[in-house]
Image: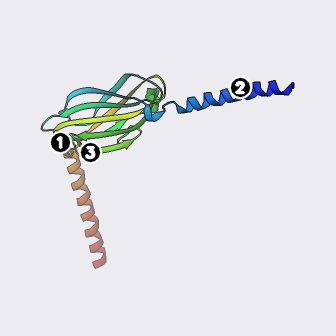
Amino acid sequence: MDYQPKLLKYGFSTLLGSLVVVALLALPGRAGAATIEDTIAYGSIGPISGPAYLGVLEPSLLGSIGDSFLDHFTFTVVPSNSFTLTTTFLPANASGVSFSSADLYSGVTLLASGPLGNIASTPTLLPGAYDLRVSGTLTATSGFYSGSVNFNSATAPIPEPETYAMMLAGLGLMGFVARRRKQKEAA
């Protein structure tokens, strides 16, 4: 008789503990997580004659752990300018977030995409409106991140006069060597 009350007592607490675990597992997880969406407009970019840099910052993501975020960084390329773009979002410059991807859109057309918030290169961006979308997940109840968008001029650089002089000197030297060999073979 002494064992039965202990058995009922421990059996009941085990049953209660199991019910608590099942209830916790039944709570909505990632599928029920909210999406935090924000748009940050940067206006016109250009004219750019060489490499340029744009710092982007999302200072205050607030939500629950597991919530996803989607930030839109919009900008316009001015006429008479074209360039390519790369992005860098490093975990060292972030807190409370895990990056999924970065996607560059022109209207509804996806131009480039990269994992973990990093785009290695894009096609040449012509004048028009663009939307850089950075997405990820909150790993804490609040987070922030910063990154860089690097613009590289798509126009070919114009060679300096010294470059032409060096090229001509090299061609002259190659012609001189070829002529000496030909004269040596004839002799």
Cα–Cα span, label 2 and label 3: 58 Å
Q: Where is residue 171 in the image (x, y as percent from the top left)?
A: 24, 59
Look at mark 2 in the image and give the residue it sits on.
13
Q: Where is residue 83 in the image (x, y as percent from the top left)?
A: 22, 41
Looking at the rendered structure, the secondary structure element under dot 2 is helix
Residue that appears at 17% across and 42% down: 126
Residue that appears at 24% across and 31% down: 74
Q: Position of residue 186 (x, y in %)?
A: 27, 78
Q: Which one is earlier in the sequence, the residue at label 1 or at label 2?
A: 2
- Colouring scheme, one of rainbow, by chain, secondary structure, one colour: rainbow
Residue that appears at 24% across and 27% down: 42
The kind of residue tagged 1 is Leu
The answer to which quarter of the image holds residue 71 is: top left
Instruction: Report if residue 135 is visible in the image.
Output: yes
Neighbourhood count class around disc 3 (C-alpha, 10 Å): few under 14, some 14–19, many 20 upward: some
Look at mark 3 in the image and give the residue it sits on.
111
Q: Which one is earlier in the sequence, the residue at label 2 or at label 3?
A: 2
Q: Which mark is residue 126?
A: 1
Q: Nearer the viewer, mark 1 or mark 3?
A: 3
Instruction: Report if residue 187 is visible in the image.
Output: no
The kind of residue tagged 2 is Ser
Q: Which of marks 2 and 3 is in front?
A: 2
Q: Where is residue 178 in the image (x, y as percent from the top left)?
A: 27, 68
The kind of residue tagged 3 is Leu
Left of 165 or right of it: where is 71? right
